[in-house]
Image (cartoon, helix red, strand yellow):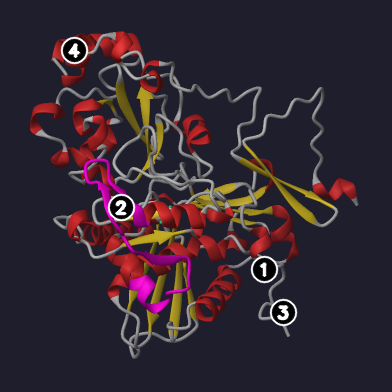
Amino acid sequence: MSMFEDIPVDVGVIYEGERVRRNDMYVELGGPKQEHKFELVKAKGLDEIEDEKIIVIGPDIKDMEEGSTHPLGIYVEVAGKDVEEDLEGVIERRIHEYSNYIEGFMHLNQRYDIWLRLNKKSFQKGLNSFDIIGKVLLRLFKSELPFIEKIQITFITDPEKVREMWKETMEIYEARDAKARGMKDEEADAFYGCTLCQSFAPTHCCVITPQRYANCGAISWFDGRASARVDPKGPIFSIDKGECIDPFKGEYTGANAVLKEKTLGEVTQVWLYTAFDYPHTSCGCFEGIAFYIPEVDGLGIVHRAFDGTTVNGLPFSTMADSTAGGRQVDGFHGVSIEYMRSPKFLQVDDGWSRVVWMPSTIKERVKDFIPEEVVDKIATENDVKTVDELKVFLEEKEHPVVERWKAIPAEAVPEMKRKEAPMPTPVSVATVATMPVSVGGFKIILKDAKIHAKKVIIRAAEEEK
Ligand code: SF4
């Protein structure tokens, strides 16, 4: 008998990557319309929780109106003799993976950024309660991570309660992130790799070091170490650093070798601390993007929660399409917020001295880590709206990037950094690094292919029946 025989919808890896569009959605939980949302895992003592208990605080799915949006907190408590605090972040990241196994249920992002949708079809099939979702999650957690002996899941939709817990949760994330600060990559005995996002970005592999936090901002070097210890054959594993080829760029023979193996030869070289040449790959879960602004030879930063238009006229979502997919895109670089607090943050590119624009909310969050002499010289959406205004602002403030304009004659700027930044063209061209096509039971992956077609017909799968 299947583990999910009593679940009204199908459950399996084939549903990973399934999107629920607004028109198909029965209900939305978290997401950009909700200020307060979170998911949190806490390690508990074996006698502190009741195994397989599911609690719902606030309206359940069946009490929600079709098309409505709600705040959500997912609080998972786990216990087991091998369960330690360092595993919390890693277990938490699996909520994303396992939720996406549920037919018609979409989970995006992590931590305080979660965005979930349930489609109408699955609701009509009977997926109308958090109790059912909880059952699927706890069964998957226990079968996939056998070191979890007891698990209890609470879904919170009551707005007041979500807000209250959200505050505590933000403090817990901050304490987790602060733990690795002060450690240096050179001193670490190993790095850690993660391929959890390969289901969405087949050539992506995170290299997690003390000073380069994972792109999703959910897995620290300590989390990687704890996970690799309890589940060494799992998607998070230890990377033997090998020889350090270049400490400034952050190039290690061990990281290069692992990248080559895990991306099946697609990526063979990575420089950890740059957005150019051989940058770390970007999946789609990054918390922010560092993007090149050729007109000022500087870098902008935008984070996922920023819903306005950046200084180059593009919103986060458009740039995310150009950055994601597990590629090394020159000048479009996925980053986590914690990496912005690292002393090695884009050091090859001049670090904060090269950053010229960022949203005010994210600047506020990381401002203690921006060198004092630069912090007021970085523009936000409140200072400038266009690149022309940005130029004036930078000159007025004597931003260090202005020196580059004088110091580097145009012909001396490397071709890659001088050319127009690769501008996304969201309307007429779909850009994908790898595109799977199913033919007669075989899956064919087209890599970096350019396809010209007179006409493209996209039909919903059910029309084929
Ligand atoms: S972004 Fe990186 S560390 Fe985070 S889940 Fe994806 S592959 Fe793992």
Question: What's under tag 3, amino acid-wise?
Answer: Glu
The CA distance from mark 1 to mark 4 is 59 Å
Q: Circle 3 is placed at which residue position?
A: 5
Q: Could you say which disc has been placed on residue 11 in the image?
A: 1
Answer left or right for 67 relative to 214: right
The CA distance from mark 1 to mark 2 is 31 Å
Q: Circle 4 is placed at which residue position?
A: 407
Instruction: Give, as a single range, the part of the protein colored magenta.
Output: 226-254
Q: Circle 2 is placed at which residue position?
A: 213
- Mark positioned earlier in the residue sequence (2 or 4): 2
Q: Between residue 301 and residue 235, name the one nearer to us.
A: 235
The image quadrant that residue 123 belongs to is bottom right
**Badge 4 element:** helix
The CA distance from mark 2 to mark 4 is 33 Å
Q: Local crowd at mark 3 within 10 Å, few (<14), some, or many (≥20)?
A: few
Whether the residues at callouts 2 and 4 have beta carbons within 8 Å, the answer is: no
The CA distance from mark 3 to mark 1 is 10 Å
User: Which label sits in the foreground, 1 or 4?
Assistant: 4
User: Which label sits in the foreground, 1 or 2?
Assistant: 2
- Mark positioned earlier in the residue sequence (2 or 3): 3
